[in-house]
Image (tube, coloured by chain):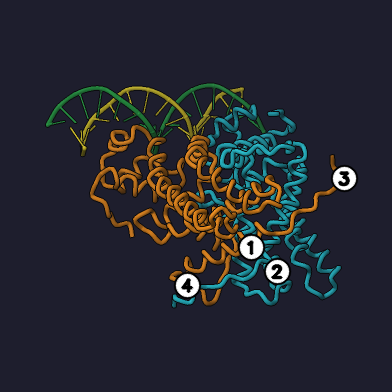
Chain colours: A cyan, B orange, C yellow, D green
Amino acid sequence: MAEVRNTDTRERILDVAERLFMAHGYDGTSMRQITGEAGVNLAAVNYHFGSKESLIQEVFRRRLDWLNEERMRVLDRLEAEAGGQPVKPSLIVDAFFGTLLRMAEDDARGGMTFLRLLGRTLTEPSEFIRAFLAHEYKVVMDRFKEALFRALPDVPKAEIVWRFHFMLGATSYAIAGTDALRLVTDWQIEEEDSVDRLDRLVPRLMSFLIGGLRAPLPQFDQSGR
Amino acid sequence: MAEVRNTDTRERILDVAERLFMAHGYDGTSMRQITGEAGVNLAAVNYHFGSKESLIQEVFRRRLDWLNEERMRVLDRLEAEAGGQPVKPSLIVDAFFGTLLRMAEDDARGGMTFLRLLGRTLTEPSEFIRAFLAHEYKVVMDRFKEALFRALPDVPKAEIVWRFHFMLGATSYAIAGTDALRLVTDWQIEEEDSVDRLDRLVPRLMSFLIGGLRAPLPQFDQSGR
DNA sequence: GTCTATATCATGATAGAC
DNA sequence: GTCTATCATGATATAGAC
């Protein structure tokens, strides 16, 4: 479980840091824990990364670079196939969230550990991490928002942005969750087992997201302003 | 903004702790910050609450006791009005999530500050806090799940539990967000201003949640087990 | 109940030998 | 690149006077 895959010191630190930040949060993880579990010297983090802040940024960059490029590639392909017509909303949603979720099956790209770290961090209070993620995400977010605007010309843009945000939340929580899910809902679903859990999470979440995105528009109370 | 409403030392500590835990997280907030901003002595927290862990538990208990009782009262009333028939899903969702969101307008019950704290904490890694919240929430969660099972007899229970979980995520993120929203989406929605933001968030989120809850069921890939 | 002073410990970071 | 040793700081918690 806690096996060491990577012999390179730098990569080993990143692997362990990713797992510990996921499990205990940024503030809750010390450099001594990281270097201890990685089997490297305490000074190695500062030598290789400069600081704890730079370390977690590198933890994210290592995964997000590929993820966001892959999202762009998928959307490029969808738009090429559509040949000038708007891409179907469900395909756009899958390109953004499906691509993310399918990372969980790819241990070489961080797998479930990175997904849970990302899900938790998006609501975490450390300001510099959120600022960093916002910067890393900006280009791809803008691109996908534009695609959704074209795909849903009858829906006000403000509504689309909000619903994008709600979809992010549902997804973050779903991937951050696992044990939080069990805690909060205390479920015992009969036929569920951990093996096919992820196979089923993706279509489940996708159905929910599309349902929310395509829901009837809200009726605002006329009493205000 | 940072005005002190409460002259009672104990309450003043709780107010400040609520705000600082929201802004900087549990690990990121020190007792020195709390007592400093509250204008009380450093030893006061340990005198009144025993420890930092007990303090944050009391921060939550103070708000959640009322919230969960209110949710139960609303559901009681809905079920009485339905007279044996299942309650409409949208009403159940509003009883759970609407009651929560309307706390934001009630500064005496923590308002937006508490909501954002709650939203962030639900994905935060501190284990003892999640365990505490799971315990505090268990009764009301079970009650609402049962109501949804009755309201949606044709939907598999596993699906309902998952979708409840997704709804929790979308809501947590929506209330935790505000500035995170602005960071991630970098929006400039024209007619939006802060005054009616909350008035409109509730119907917006409700439409999304109901749309997700009532979405067509997912088609699982038959290739797996 | 409130204060000062302090005990005890863990943290991030670095200097300098090898 | 890796190590030991250490610094400076800030953390939670408590003892004991008032």
Cβ atoms at labels 4 and 2 below 8 Å apart:
no
Three-letter code, disc 4 = Asp
Using the image, tell me which numbered label, if any, was put on residue B223: 3
The answer to whether residue A58 is visible is: no
Q: Are marks 3 and 1 on the same chain?
A: no
Q: Position of residue A192 (x, y in %)?
A: 73, 38
Cβ atoms at labels 1 and 2 below 8 Å apart:
yes
Residue located at (53% from left, 34% from top)? A30
Up the image or down, B90 lies above or below B41; here it is below
Q: Secondary structure at mark 3?
A: loop
Tag 4 residue = B193
Q: Are marks 1 and 4 on the same chain?
A: no
The disc numbered 2 marks a residue on which chain?
A
Q: Position of residue A91 (x, y in %)?
A: 78, 62
Residue located at (74% from left, 41% from top)? A197
The disc numbered 3 marks a residue on which chain?
B
Q: Residues within 10 Å of mark 1 (few under 14, many from 20)?
A: many
Up the image or down, A65 lies above or below A30; here it is below
Distance from the alpha carbon under mark 2 to that under mark 3: 31 Å
Three-letter code, disc 3 = Ser
Three-letter code, disc 1 = Phe
Q: Nearer the viewer, mark 3 or mark 1?
A: 3
Q: Secondary structure at mark 2?
A: helix
